Image (spheres, rainbow, N blue to C red):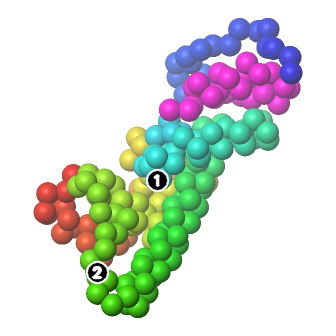
């Protein structure tokens, strides 16, 4: 692919300038300019990784790479805000991975319980996957709770606690900006309920991070 000969603004100032800069780089990417992709990767990788880490932990790097692979192979159209597209793809991939891990752990737990029940003298207190250091256990409980929420609930919580504005969240999830606060409050209530059911509240009282 050909290199882009035109200089690109490295650090746009205002949101409007960022949108214009992203649009120019996307145009270059669609034209096959490797440098355009490299700059977009540098501009957004840390934010995409941070969002995914809140959902899936150590798996975040692999999923972030997948987000940018999709961008490279099929960049969004000119009418799409790139940041919104990236955050939407990232949270969908992360949520799907979270649900898959929940299913895997549920199957694994049933298998361990079945094996313990059929082995005389087997310990009923075999360590579970979430038996880790306190902070890791808290993170595990948070991710378990997120996996039990609807996709939109998990997305809006992760995006908000990744410091996205209501405007950015609205763009990423296709919501009216004025409705973000309502959706967020509902998601927070639902998370608190599920987290409590998983024992998170008691864990926190006992010294969790």
- Which one is nearer the viewer's eye here, 185 or 34? 34
- Name the residue tied to disc 1: 55
- The vertical placement of 56 against 40, above or below, is below
- Name the residue tied to disc 2: 123
The x and y percentages for residue 118 are: 41, 91
Q: Residues within 10 Å of mark 1 (few under 14, many from 20)?
A: many
Magenta extent: 19-46
- Which one is nearer the viewer's eye here, 207 or 185? 207
* Identity of the residue drawn at 55% across and 16% down: 11
Main SS of the magenta segment? helix
The x and y percentages for residue 48 are: 54, 39
* Identity of the residue drawn at 42% across and 55% down: 157
* Identity of the residue drawn at 50% across and 32% down: 46
- Which one is nearer the viewer's eye here, 70 or 24? 70
Between tags 2 and 1, which lies in front?
2
On residue 4, which mark appears?
A: none
The x and y percentages for residue 108 are: 47, 74
Toward the left, the furthest residue is 206
Residue 188 in sight in this render: no
Toward the front, the furthest residue is 120
Number of marks in picture: 2
**How far, Cα to Cα, is label 2 from label 1?**
32 Å
- The vertical placement of 99 against 87, above or below, is below
């Amino acid at each position: 692919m050909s290199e882009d000969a035109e200089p690109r603004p490295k650090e746009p100032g205002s949101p409007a300038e960022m949108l214009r800069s992203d649009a120019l780089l996307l145009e270059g990417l669609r034209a096959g300019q490797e440098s355009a992709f490299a700059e977009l990767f540098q501009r957004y990788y840390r934010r995409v990784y941070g969002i995914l880490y809140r959902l899936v932990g150590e798996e975040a790097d692999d999923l972030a790479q997948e987000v940018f692979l999709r961008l490279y192979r099929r960049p969004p159209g000119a009418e799409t805000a790139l940041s919104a597209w990236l955050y939407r793809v990232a949270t969908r991939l992360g949520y799907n991975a979270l649900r898959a891990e929940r299913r895997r752990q549920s199957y694994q737990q049933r298998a361990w319980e079945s094996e313990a029940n059929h082995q005389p003298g087997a310990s009923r207190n075999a360590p579970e996957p979430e038996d880790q250091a306190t902070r890791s256990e808290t993170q595990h409980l948070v991710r378990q709770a997120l996996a039990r929420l609807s996709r939109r609930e998990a997305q809006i919580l992760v995006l908000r606690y990744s410091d996205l504005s209501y405007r950015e969240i609205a763009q990423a999830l296709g919501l009216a900006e004025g409705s973000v606060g309502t959706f967020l409050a509902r998601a927070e209530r639902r998370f608190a309920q599920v987290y409590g059911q998983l024992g998170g509240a008691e864990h926190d009282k006992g010294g969790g991070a």
